[in-house]
Amino acid sequence: MDDAELVARAREAFDGAYVPYSEYPVGAALETADGTVFVGCNIENANYSNSLHAEEVAIAEAVKNGHQTFARLAVASAAQDGVTPCGMCRQTLAEFADADLRVLCDGPDGVAEYTLGDLIPNTISLETLEDAADRRERGGGR
């Protein structure tokens, strides 16, 4: 599947979005290392903190089905405004993907490409948490 097809899958995914509050449908298509694609759309809740983002839904579906290594992510909104994953989704992606994960964002002038590392440098990881714990044990504070 080429980049254009993955973006098209993200566009198709936003058709299923439940967005009565923001009226801003978003779709995501996440390709695993073996080429399987999982899609997600945003699902809002009147309590906004309980809303699910398209990327989260796609990641959850992939992980639920035994996939934890990802190759590419495409994100699209009905506004075709170049939406990128939010900070929370970026951190969730970083749990499963390296900084070189390709992120394709559908925009008014075509598809913009980033890496996850471009979007969220210096993520919180198991290594950063272990480093912090080691420093505390040595009396180094935070």
Image: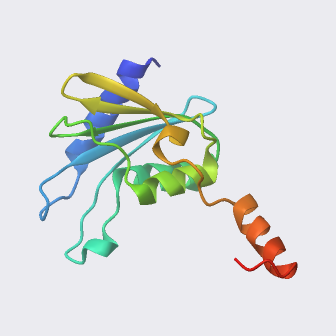
Colour scheme in the image? rainbow
Residue at the spot x=42%, y=21% of the render?
A: 3
Above or below residue 142? Residue 21 is above
Residue 89 screen position, x and y as percent? 44, 55
Quarter of the view holding residue 104: top left
Residue 31 screen position, x and y as percent? 51, 34
Q: Is residue 122 left or right of residue 88?
A: right
Outermost right residue: 138
Residue 100 screen position, x and y as percent? 59, 34
Above or below residue 135? Residue 128 is above
Residue at the spot x=29%, y=41% of the render?
A: 13
Q: Is residue 65 visible?
A: no
Residue at the spot x=36%, y=19% of the render?
A: 4
Residue 16 screen position, x and y as percent? 24, 48
Residue at the spot x=18%, y=27% of the render?
A: 108
Outermost front residue: 140
Q: Is residue 3 visible?
A: yes
**142 and 23: which one is in front?**
142
Counting every numbered tag in the picture gives 0
**9 and 71: which one is in front?**
71
Above or below residue 3? Residue 32 is below
- Quadrant position of the C terminus in the picture: bottom right
**139 and 58: which one is in front?**
139
Quarter of the view holding residue 9: top left
